[in-house]
Structure formats: C-alpha cells, structure tokens
Amino acid sequence: MAQPGDAGQPATSAEHHDEARAKVPSTSIVTCWMRALESRKPESSRLIFDPFAERLCGSGAHAQRLLDESLMKTSNQVDFWLDMMASRTRWLDDAIVAAKPTQLVIVGSGLDSRAWRMNALSLAEIFELDFPEVLHAKATLLDAENPVGCWHAVPANLGKDDWLSSLALAGFHHGHATVWLLEGLTGYLTPQELDALFGKITAASAAGSSILATFTGLGSGQETNMHKTSWNSTREVETFLANYGWAADAQRIQDIAAGYGRAKHIPESWEYYFCKASRAQAACRGC
C-alpha cells in the first residue's frame, strides 16, 4: 500500500452551478455525468442504463466542463473513462444482482442511483452513507421518484462520526447478512482511515456478509492530489482484506472490461482493481 506525500484538497471541494447541487463534490458529478453519457448510447452498445443520471448531474454543459477539466489532469481521454466507469458500474451491478441482498450499505454513495434504478433491490433495506449535504441534494433531486426498495439516508462524516450508531438508528440489523458497497472510495482515504473503516465494517458484519469494492493501483495515472492511498497489486488488496477476516478475490480492470468487450481503450499498464470479499463467520464482539 502506498501513500502519496501530498493529499491536497479534499474530494469535497468543488465549484458548483446551482443551489440544489451546491455542496455535491465535483468528483460525484463527473462520475454521474459519465453514467449519463454511457446511458445515451444505443441499447445494443451501452453497458449500463441510468435513467436518473442526467437529472442528478444537472446542467450537461457544466458537468461536461468538469469532465473536461478532469481530462486535462490525465493522459487518458474520454473513451478510456467511459469504458472504465461503465465497466465498473456494470460489474458492481452484476455482483449486486448475484448477491440478492436484503441489506445493502453504500459507503460514500455520492450520486449513486441504484436504490432507484435496480429492481434487484426491491426487497432490500438500502442504507446510504455520505455527507448530509450530498444526501439532501439527492433526496431533493429525486423527490418525485420512489426508490425500488426501502431507502435510508444516513448522514455521516466517515472519518469523524459514529456512523455505526447512526446506521443502527436508521434500522440497520447487525444480525443480518449485509452487502457493503465501496465504489471509488478507498483511494480517497488514508491508511489509518481505511483501517478504521474496515474495522467497523467487519464488526458490523454477520456471517454471510460480503464486500464489493474498488481500489486504485499505484502508478495508474488515476492518482490525483485527492488520492491518499494506492495499491501495488491484486494480491496486496486480498491480503489487506484477509487481515480483517475476509476471503477476497481481486481482479484487474483489464480482465473485467475485456469480459464486457470494453478493454480497447484501457492500457495494460493501468492499475485499478475490483474486489469481492466474503465472510463466513460473524465478527467476535468483545473479543
């Protein structure tokens, strides 16, 4: 695990274009905009369809400007980012469908719309953890829509708040198997913050729980002044999770994207990892 020397500005700093999204991170808007662009493609060629993405992003011109600014900071172009984000979203969607969760926790949810667009979650309790202003913006923008399952907004600063207690107050059941989703989050946390996060996730996980997470690879070009932790290999990711009692299977993005026919624009040297992890036994409370 590597740690860049300068963490720079936090991921929550951004310039915004309207009151509804005034405190939504620019990174969330850019990611959402790429889902919108992928969703505009013909049904025969798109990997995902997110009917809420454009509404969540707001002004397409502003979202495209944020994307253009992001492209200026990297050697990769828009085709790369669309293939990367579409593959990531589709892989996580497929994994959620396969898991058939009755309890899903989306950690650092941003402008994720799965609670509204995935019929596979119709019987699930869905908890979203993020800054209160982000969750408020999402609830406001999707006020006219009904979630497919039972959606719970859990406002929290992951690094400072007792978010496990907030989860419990929102209706989270420690005795139920849980799917934990961490999409595009781990790279923004320091090693110490990651240790605290996965320690809490483990403590709250009943037998049969699972983690779906992505990890930024060292030297991927994905690293920015906001990224605080990077990983050297899939093995390092698997070992990290094994230290908390999780059996993990990490894969490189090239292998995932190739399975979807979208690896053409992703360089072989670009390191980014998708990981599934499972836990056969519950954590030992009070041990």
Image (spheres, rainbow, N blue to C red):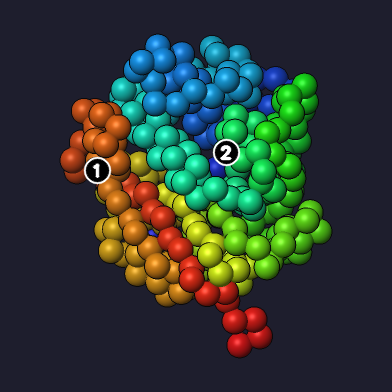
Circle 2 residues within 10 Å: few <14, some 14–19, many ≥20: many
- Work out how far the residue at label 1 is from the one at label 2, CA to CA, in angstroms: 25 Å
Circle 1 residues within 10 Å: few <14, some 14–19, many ≥20: some
Seen at 45% across and 26% down, the residue is 48
The residue at the far bottom in this view is 287
Rendered-image quadrant of the C terminus: bottom right
Seen at 54% across and 24% down, the residue is 50
Whether residue 166 is visible, yes or no, is: no
Q: Which residue is mark 2?
A: 120
Residue 131 spot, x, y in % from top left: 69, 45
Q: Mark 2: which secondary structure?
A: helix
Which is nearer the eye, 68 or 215? Answer: 215
Which is nearer the eye, 96 or 140? Answer: 96
- Among numbered discs 1 and 2, the one appearing first in the sequence: 2
Q: Which residue is mark 1?
A: 255
Residue 41 picture quarter: top left
Residue 121 spot, x, y in % from top left: 61, 40
Rendered-image quadrant of the N terminus: bottom left
Which is nearer the eye, 93 or 192? Answer: 93
Residue 145 picture quarter: top right
What kind of residue is marked 1? Asp
